[in-house]
Amino acid sequence: MRKNRKMTALFLSCILCGILLRLIFASCVSGSLSEETIETEEFRRLDYSEEFQKDVWEYARQNNLSGSEVLTQELIMNEFSPNEFSTPSIHEFKRRRQFFQLYAKDAYDSIVRACKALWEDTVYFPVAGFSREDTVFSFENTWMDSRNYGGNRGHEGCDIFGTYDIRGYYPIISVCDGYVEQIGWLPLGGWRIGIRGNLGGYFYYAHLSEYGKEFQIGDSVKAGQLLGFMGDSGYGEEGTTGKFPVHLHFGCYIRSRDGKEISVNPYPILCALTESIKCYSDERSRIQQEIKGVSKYGYTVMA
């Protein structure tokens, strides 16, 4: 009889300890997460490898799940700097979802939305070429590196360089479906265009040599559509060129709770999109008749 009482007491103690630990964990999670979490540098730097990203999306595809929600859970569980994918069971994934929806719903949903805007909207690498040699592009992780033109500031993007340092040579295309939100000259960005993706992300293309057509604010665009050509405009009054090598400055932004645009590191996104570089043709003269947009170099490119 006494033995049974001890076993019962031990069993109840284990249950109570489990409940207590769960409450402590819930308190830690709910206390560290908020709708402002997406504004933190921990989230915005997208500090995870391309291999990790591939594993997340492959797991989501195989299990018919939202890749952005799988990614969100992995980020939260690893303090936004995961080393490798945990490969949870479906039961564990659903248990996590219930937990986060119960204890940190608004924060959880905001992170999922941000991941969708950054990862599910993007389809193409922002620079296209015409041959395998043309599609060799270089870029480095320079997000938030120091810049001093116009005052000390962080570099809110990545600079993409082509094989050839020729103004107006490389087509710049939209990474996503969306619409034109901003266009025109900026002292820093030169000729620039900003596309708002259908899932809310804002994608910024700067230092263009020219536009693919006379865009108007509100015009719809499709992923892969010609926006303009790589150039070296900017760092001065309208029309200024030649202050730096020809390149594309590409930036990614999401909206905060209060509607402010927040810069996010585009480097991991660009690394993933290198598998989706658009190559029009090895022979420029044979590009399809319906292709619009004409470069000053005399070849046509796809609109």
Image (cartoon, rainbow, N blue to C red):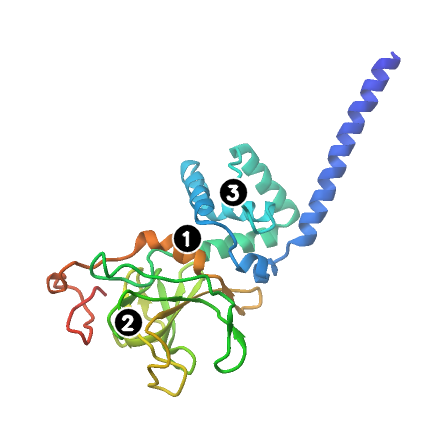
Select label 3 or label 2 by which is in front: 2
Picture residue at 74% right of the left edge, 43% below the top: 24
The residue tagged 1 is 120
Quadrant housing residue 237: bottom left
Asked if 142 appears above or below 58 in the picture, the reply is below
Q: Is residue 66 visible?
A: no
Using the numbered discs, state the Cα–Cα distance from disc 2 to disc 1 in whole angstroms.
32 Å
Q: Earlier in the sequence, mark 2 or mark 1?
A: 1
The residue labelled by disc 3 is: 84
Write down the residue under mark 2: 165
Looking at the image, do the residues carrying marks 3 and 1 touch, with CB atoms under 8 Å apart? no
In the rendered image, residue 193, in percent from the top left (x then y), is placed at 36, 73
In front here: 244 or 41? 244
Image quadrant in which you'd find residue 33: bottom right
Q: Residue at x 20, y 73 (%)?
A: 295
Q: Position of residue 101 (x, y in %)?
A: 60, 46
Q: Amino acid at mark 2?
A: Asp
**Between marks 3 and 1, how big is the CA–CA gap?**
21 Å
> What secondary structure is marked by label 2?
loop
